Image (tube, rainbow, N blue to C red):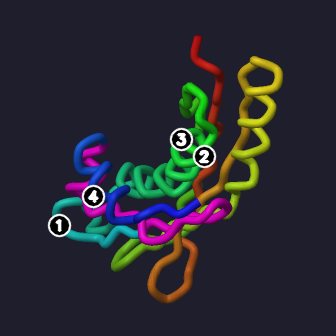
Amino acid sequence: MAVSTGKFNTFTFFKLPSAWWCGVRLRYMDKNKAVVTVRHRWFNQNPFKSLFWAVQGMAAELSTGAMVITQIRDSGKRISMLVASNKANFSKKATGKITFTCEDGHLVGEALRKTIETGEGQTFWMKSTGINEDGVVVSTFNFEWTVKLKT
């Protein structure tokens, strides 16, 4: 599964413009792992001079959703995807460059296989961890994704 991060970032410009303008960028992706970065700037800060929680959420969601989008495309099937719920934990003030990494791509393939075989929707949780330039975890997001065949 070869994915051009440049093409995916162009996709975000047109389909997720608020994420793109806030500086959210896909840096790496393969079948099992995706890495997204965002840098704290005036434009995406909160009143406490750190990265706004929603911008962190956009970056974290993209690190999970990019793999879902790509694996759905590669399946050749018409499948819908949606975040059903999410949970987040903020452990340190987010300043500088924050890197969100998700290594749960293997969960996507299994859910897609089941929904294609059974025709029933599937849900699965994916975790993304945000780390600052010093290697300290600043936030952890968990997203419950749902996938189902389109009729």
Quadrant the C terminus occupies? top right
Which amino acid type corresponds to the residue marked 2 in the rendered image? Answer: Gln
Give the label, 2 or 1, closer to the camera.
2
Residue 21's quadrant in the figure? Answer: bottom left
Residue 74 coordinates in the image, percent (x, y): 58, 45
Vertical side of 1 occupied by 123: above or below:
above
Per the model, the C-alpha gap separating discs 4 and 2 is 34 Å
* Residue highlighted by disc 3: 73
* Residue highlighted by disc 4: 46
Farthest left residue?
Answer: 42
* Residue highlighted by disc 2: 71
Per the model, the C-alpha gap separating discs 4 and 3 is 36 Å
Which amino acid type corresponds to the residue marked 1 in the rendered image? Answer: Trp
Per the model, the C-alpha gap separating discs 2 and 1 is 35 Å
Residue 90 coordinates in the image, percent (x, y): 53, 60
Farthest front residue?
Answer: 76
Residue 122 coordinates in the image, percent (x, y): 74, 28
The answer to whether mark 3 and mark 2 are in CB contact below 8 A is yes
Give the label, 1 or 4, closer to the camera.
1
Per the model, the C-alpha gap separating discs 1 and 4 is 9 Å
Q: What's drawn in magenta, residue-wise? A: 16-36
Q: Secondary structure at mark 4?
A: loop
Which amino acid type corresponds to the residue marked 4 in the rendered image? Answer: Asn
Which amino acid type corresponds to the residue marked 3 in the rendered image? Answer: Arg
Magenta-span inclusion, residue 17: yes
* Residue 63 shown left or right of residue 4 in the figure: right
Q: Of residues 17 and 11, which is closer to you in this image?
A: 11
Q: Of residues 38 and 150, which is closer to you in this image?
A: 150
